[in-house]
Image: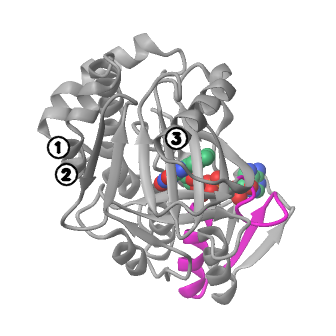
Amino acid sequence: MDKVLISGAGLAGLSAAINLAKEGYEVNVFERNKDVGQRFHGDLQGLENWSEKEDVLAEIRKMSIDTNFDCHPFSIITATNSIKTNEVTTLKKPLYYLVKRGNVDNSLDFGLKEQALDAGVNIHFEKTINEEDADIVATGPVLENVVGVVKGITFKTDLKDTATVLFNNEAAFKGYSYLLVTKGYGCMSSVLLDNFNKTDSCFRKTKEFFSNLYKFNIEEARNCGGMGCFSINSRFKKGKTIFVGEAAGLQDLFLGFGMRYAITSGFQAARSIINDEDYEIMAKSCFEGKLKAGIVNRYLWEKLNKNNYSLAVNNFNWIINNFNWIYNYNMFWRILYPFALNGMRRRYNWFK
Ligand SMILES: Cc1cc2nc3c(=O)[nH]c(=O)nc-3n(C[C@H](O)[C@H](O)[C@H](O)COP(=O)(O)OP(=O)(O)OC[C@H]3O[C@@H](n4cnc5c(N)ncnc54)[C@H](O)[C@@H]3O)c2cc1C
């Protein structure tokens, strides 16, 4: 195959496109919107640096992708449940890199678009193709798999750089709220993992809480947010068509960090075509354990944090410094998985 058709110009689709075009393939990407990143609004998102031992930026560069976007390392994170506050510093490497998403200068989406165009990819905006005609489907969230809803704002501020996360069900039901500021640019959001009808009231509470914690100004506020999808039955292939990113159900059920999975799965899809390897085998060996770990993590998180998240905040240092172990489907998680699966099935209708 020397021509490849990709549906969706998100992180997963562009990662695949860049790699294929660099190997000489004729790549056509069909994007339903008028530009890349339209489901985001300048949000700050964390490119997580804990699920693998290797630094995420080094890994991305090995995937033939340049870091031509704003990217700020964060090694300090503050957690609070509104009663107790705990600040943790990671020593070995940054916990994550903050990037901008969507239609703003130097965003991750614009950076990947530029690299794809430079590599000779044809991106057809406001055009779609049928799923079965695409070689790679990278169309993002699948509506019936929505497990989280995010509501927030981006803004300009004088507040110094911070990454503060709030665990409080009134501010983010079963999820978390966050306040991120880098170089005078901020993003404050609530991530709800249930009771989505409480989104507005939760975000009001989040704003109130952070305004009391830090006295800070909010200028030029813009709404941001969206939804996250997860599927226990990840679909990596249907017929000849390969699925990547959230379209494949690749999402971290615990905290909703899907960007690294999206970029990696796009890269793997490209390698499977270039080397004529079975993408399904590659994707399963890379992601199955992580997806299962996400289920165990979410189950334990909900079970152990009924008491105002005090366990999480009190032990935040241990959690953060053991994130790699927690995320990698270790022996204990394998034993717990069947219980977690049953527990989650009993708890949620969507968990089929
Ligand atoms: C508010 C919010 C905050 C988040 N924060 C984080 C975070 O801090 N860290 C993290 O790692 N992850 C975060 N995530 C998740 C992360 O953004 C996603 O997992 C990631 O963007 C998925 O990439 P993707 O390429 O699969 O999909 P997308 O980035 O959604 O790209 C899919 C593309 O396909 C296009 N498309 C859709 N349907 C069609 C069609 N039929 N034909 C053609 N094109 C189509 C869309 O327009 C879009 O451009 C967050 C998500 C949200 C909503």
| Residue 100 falls in image quadrant | bottom right
Q: Which mark is residue 87?
A: none
Whichever of labels 3 and 1 marks the residue nearer the N terminus, that label is 3
Q: Is residue 289 left or right of residue 283?
A: left
For the residue pair 175 and 292, the one nearer the viewer reads as: 175
User: x%, y% of residue 65?
Assistant: 49, 79
Query: What residue is shown with label 2?
Result: 321
Confirm if mark 2 falls within 8 A of ligand 1.
no
Would residue 223 be counted in the magenta stretch?
no
Q: In the rendered view, would you say 216 is above or below 308? A: below
Callout 2: helix, strand or loop? Answer: helix
Residue type at the position of mark 3: Phe
Confirm if mark 3 falls within 8 A of ligand 1.
no
Magenta-colored span: 11-39
- The quarter in which the N terminus is drawn is bottom right
Q: Residues within 10 Å of mark 2 (few under 14, many from 20)?
A: some
Callout 3: helix, strand or loop? Answer: helix
Which numbered mark, 2 or 3, is in the foreground of this view?
3
Q: Looking at this rendering, what residue extends furthest in the left direction? A: 331
For the residue pair 215 and 243, the one nearer the viewer reads as: 215
Q: Which mark is residue 210?
A: 3
Q: Badges 3 and 1: C-beta atoms under 8 Å apart? A: no
Q: Looking at this rendering, what residue extends furthest in the top direction? A: 346
Q: Badges 2 and 1: C-beta atoms under 8 Å apart? A: yes
